[in-house]
């Protein structure tokens, strides 16, 4: 019996304390993505070469593999909001950046979105925002989607706020929003209603220009 | 793609001239190559260390960063070189890879740092040459094990329960980590006690007690006090059964739980009792029944839940399975050889105890392990010679695999020690993280004060602004925008608890101040008077002196008491002046100071604002929270 056991165990590899991590792990971490050339990107976006260089260097430093997956994105975003829980909102944000719905953000996605947000026209910026709110991408924002988004934003505030956060604060916020935006009172906000209402509001228009010189 | 292929292609194409005479049709046109053929030297500056290499060298591997157009992103027009802000020591190895085609792993480097560099330059680690591959793999595995353990330790211990956990989940957690609740701890110790009692009872019931009256033979205690032992056994088995059923109920995956080692031990420990109950008092069957009672001793293995050391031992044996197997195999071989030899050597002797080869096994084992009982002894000279060879070889064979087992045990033991140390340091780490968070909050609140001040008086902003980096400014602006979106402000823990305590007080004072605020405040800023009420409450609570630290908001609140007209010379007086403003609720300045962005009444929708923190790589890289520049903030002016 010892013979049998001996021969059997001699042939098997050494059993580690933990299960042998598959070597696929090595392959998985090496998924690399290389962006398009500098010239193409310059043509696609509203940035010049120097700005693209700066952007890419930062991006590449954080994500050497060239792509950001949702987990990494959530972690990064959460670092700016240490008080609360930014993961839900980061999820929606991630989906808004990941236009191809591929599950990861590449440098091109990142830079095109930035270009729209920083250098785009008013309509483009508003369109981007509409896409962010429209979670299921059906062209309409309904109350549930808006409530989810607003709740996610409130989650980022965390617990210690002043005044104390009440449970129905998101709901009130959403009601106010719909009152403003939903012109024909059909319960959903379409892109045109959204753009029209935003253009009527001076504060929004003014704030939209606040961040133009971020880069 | 291997270096060879790219380099040799021109030769292969030139050699195609040899096909021309044989070809029946004309050759296709060659592809037009517009790029300049002449080779040039590229300058690569890695953190100040300048490397030079041919362009062709880098082009050998077009699917890496340096070989593709990706490096253009790092090209510096002014200095005409490629600048990388990375480790120059590591870059040496990377560049050598391009030159020689073999990637080497520097042994003194950290495996993770090396991996990161490889990932940055787009090189797949599989290319590491054979000379260094083994070392790389080993260290990588070790690192992964360590990381996995750390995450396990973090998750398993002391993680706060998710808020909506069912009783079943809570029960499971109580079983797995007895330190989490007192009930669990009590249960843990009770089961431990009963295991001990059961094992001791098993042992004691075989000890011979004084015989019953009228009998001569010594009776084992088990038979003398049969009822008592039976009751004790029943109690223990009841407890164990109850525990097992509770664990089964609470387990997240019942199948997996039933297959786990501990559960098998539990079952084996309690089964004999139930089988004994069921079994009839039959003479024939009772023999088998007695054997079954032996399994009761497995209850002692239940202690492994209570003892970390036992678990380590178990893991060591499992991980050394191959060494142990080798030991067993070689021992078996030696036993068979020597038994055969001894048998044939002693065959002729009269009255020899070596009656058969299997009988000689016993002698061989006893001799090889140097026990030497002496119940079987060789008599012939040949037998004695082989016997001595047998005992010498036994020592050698057993001594060989032992160091491997020992080193494995040592490794596992140290890993465990590390886990314990980490758990102990966890508390300190959490405390530090909490303090850092508080620091962020306070910095942010300070920023808001300064900003308010800045809007009114641009001279004094310079003093405050200088002390903060651009990154901090932008981060605070982001947080400020979030506040505006949700129309709630960030506070710290202390103020929050004050708020909860003094809410009633706040209401009273707010009513009295609302009139005066309405006079001055041009906007219905909701933050205005409740905040002032809060300060009043804080004033009542805090009676300490004016301390100008950028620390707690409470101290800032106490600052508010000072209504002085100190000219703005020092930092402290700046704050005093600010508070001076704030107390005059009636002034128009007040509202402007508190809320710098005018807040029109509700019903404006949310708007999208582009990300704020700019990617200033220099600053970003130094701070942990490096800005990933597509932060999205939404501001609503409600």
Image (tube, grey):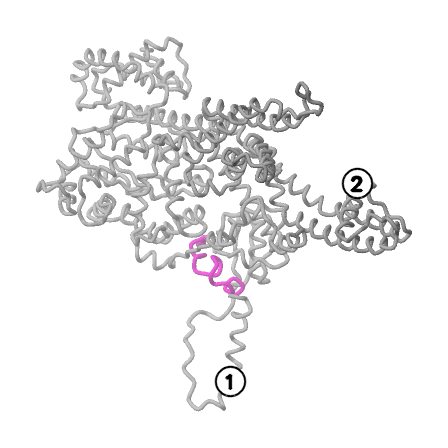
Query: Which quadrant holds the C terminus of chain B?
Result: top left
Disc 2 secondary structure class: loop
Residue B76 screen position, x and y as percent: 45, 53
Which residues are the magenta region?
B56-78
Residue at far left of view: A184
Disc 1 secondary structure class: helix
- Work out whether residue B607 can be spotted: yes
Residue A141 screen position, x and y as percent: 18, 44
Labelled disc at residue B106: none
What residue does disc 1 label? B17
Report crowding for label 2: few under 14, some 14 to 19, many 20 or more residues within 10 A (C-alpha).
few
User: Mark 2 or mark 1, which is nearer to you?
Assistant: 2
Labelled disc at residue B371: 2
Q: Quadrant of residue B318?
A: top right
Report crowding for label 1: few under 14, some 14 to 19, many 20 or more residues within 10 A (C-alpha).
few
Q: Image height check: is B439 above or below B317?
A: above
Q: Nearer the viewer, residue B124 or B83?
A: B124
Say whether residue A89 is left or right of residue B416. left
The tag earlier along the polypeptide, 2 or 1, is: 1
Q: Residue B76 colored magenta? A: yes
Q: Image height check: is B447 above or below B364?
A: above
Say whether residue B342 is left or right of residue B212. right
Q: Residue B586 colored magenta? A: no
- Find the distance from the CA under tag 2 to the CA under tag 1: 83 Å
Q: Nearer the viewer, residue B592 or B504?
A: B504
Chain under disc 2 = B
Residue at far front of view: B214
Q: Nearer the viewer, residue B215 or B367?
A: B215
């Amino acid at each position: 019996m010892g013979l049998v056991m001996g021969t059997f165990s001699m042939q098997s590899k050494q059993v580690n304390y933990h299960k042998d991590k598959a070597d696929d792990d090595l392959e998985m971490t090496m998924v690399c993505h290389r962006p398009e050339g500098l010239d193409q990107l310059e043509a696609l976006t509203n940035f010049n070469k120097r700005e693209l260089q700066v952007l890419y260097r930062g991006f590449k430093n954080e994500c050497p593999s060239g792509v950001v997956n949702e987990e990494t994105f959530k972690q990064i975003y959460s670092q700016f909001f240490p008080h609360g829980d930014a993961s839900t909102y980061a999820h929606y944000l991630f989906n808004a950046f990941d236009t191809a719905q591929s599950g990861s953000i590449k440098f091109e996605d990142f830079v095109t979105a930035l270009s729209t947000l920083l250098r785009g026209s008013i309509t483009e910026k508003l369109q981007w925002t509409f896409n962010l709110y429209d979670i299921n991408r059906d062209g309409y924002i309904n109350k549930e989607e808006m409530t989810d988004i607003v709740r996610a934003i409130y989650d980022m505030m965390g617990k210690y706020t002043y005044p104390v956060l009440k449970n129905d604060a998101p709901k009130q916020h959403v009601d106010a929003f719909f009152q403003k935006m939903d012109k024909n009172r059909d319960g959903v906000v379409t892109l045109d209603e959204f753009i029209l209402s935003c253009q009527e509001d001076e504060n929004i228009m003014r704030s939209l220009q606040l961040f133009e010189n971020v880069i | 793609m291997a270096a060879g292929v790219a380099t040799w292609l021109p030769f292969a194409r030139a050699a195609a001239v040899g096909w021309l005479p044989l070809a029946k049709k004309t050759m296709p046109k060659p592809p037009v190559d517009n790029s300049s053929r002449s080779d040039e030297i590229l300058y690569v500056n890695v953190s100040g260390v300048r490397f030079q290499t041919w362009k062709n060298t880098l082009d050998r591997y077009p699917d890496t960063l340096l070989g593709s157009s990706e490096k253009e992103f790092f090209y510096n027009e002014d200095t005409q070189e490629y600048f990388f802000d990375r480790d120059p020591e590591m870059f040496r190895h990377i560049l050598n890879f391009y030159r020689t085609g073999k990637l080497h792993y520097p042994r003194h480097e950290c495996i993770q740092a090396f991996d990161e560099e490889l990932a940055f330059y787009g090189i797949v680690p599989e290319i590491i040459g054979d000379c260094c591959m083994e070392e790389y793999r080993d260290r990588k595995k070790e690192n992964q094990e360590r990381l996995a353990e750390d995450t396990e330790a973090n998750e398993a211990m002391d993680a706060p329960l998710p808020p909506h956990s069912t009783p079943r989940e809570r029960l499971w957690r109580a079983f797995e980590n007895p330190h989490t609740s007192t009930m669990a701890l009590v249960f843990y110790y009770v089961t431990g006690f009963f295991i001990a009692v059961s094992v001791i009872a098993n042992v004691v019931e075989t000890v011979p007690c004084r015989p019953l009256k009228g009998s001569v033979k010594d009776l084992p205690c088990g038979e003398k006090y049969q009822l008592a032992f039976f009751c004790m056994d029943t109690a223990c088995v009841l407890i164990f059964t109850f525990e097992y059923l509770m664990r089964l109920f609470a387990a997240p995956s019942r199948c997996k739980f039933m297959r786990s080692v501990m559960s098998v031990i539990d079952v084996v420990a309690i089964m004999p009792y139930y089988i004994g109950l069921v079994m009839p008092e039959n003479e024939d069957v009772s023999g088998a029944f007695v054997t079954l009672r032996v399994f009761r001793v497995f209850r002692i293995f239940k202690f492994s839940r209570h003892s970390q050391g036992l678990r380590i031992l178990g893991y060591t044996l499992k991980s050394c399975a191959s060494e142990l197997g080798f030991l067993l195999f070689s021992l078996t071989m030696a036993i068979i050889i020597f038994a055969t030899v001894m048998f044939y050597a002693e065959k002729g002797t009269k009255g020899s105890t070596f009656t058969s080869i299997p009988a000689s096994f016993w002698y061989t084992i006893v001799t090889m392990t140097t026990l030497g009982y002496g119940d079987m002894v060789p008599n012939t000279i040949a037998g004695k010679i082989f016997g001595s060879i047998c005992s010498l070889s036994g020592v050698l064979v057993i001594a060989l695999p032992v160091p491997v087992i020992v080193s494995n045990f040592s490794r596992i033991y140290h890993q465990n020690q590390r886990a314990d140390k980490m758990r102990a340091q966890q508390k300190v780490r959490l405390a530090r993280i909490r303090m850092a968070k508080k620091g962020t909050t306070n910095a942010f609140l300070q920023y808001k004060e300064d900003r308010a001040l800045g809007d009114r008086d641009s001279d004094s902003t310079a003093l405050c602004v200088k002390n903060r980096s651009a990154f901090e400014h932008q981060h605070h602006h982001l947080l400020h925008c979030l506040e505006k979106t949700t129309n709630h402000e960030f506070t710290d823990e202390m103020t929050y608890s004050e708020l909860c305590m003094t809410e009633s007080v706040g209401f009273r004072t707010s009513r009295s101040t609302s009139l005066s605020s309405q006079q001055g405040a041009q906007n219905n800023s909701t933050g205005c008077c409740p905040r002032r009420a809060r300060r009043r409450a804080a004033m009542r609570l805090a009676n300490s002196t004016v301390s100008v630290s950028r620390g707690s908001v409470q101290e800032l609140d106490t600052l508010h008491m000072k209504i002085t007209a100190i000219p703005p010379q020092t930092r402290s007086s700046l704050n005093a002046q600010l508070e001076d403003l704030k107390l005059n609720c009636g002034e128009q300045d007040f509202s402007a100071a508190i809320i710098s962005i005018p807040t029109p009444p509700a019903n404006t929708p949310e708007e999208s604002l582009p990300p704020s923190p700019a990617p200033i790589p220099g600053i970003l890289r130094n701070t942990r929270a490096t800005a990933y520049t597509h932060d999205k903030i939404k501001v609503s002016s409600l």
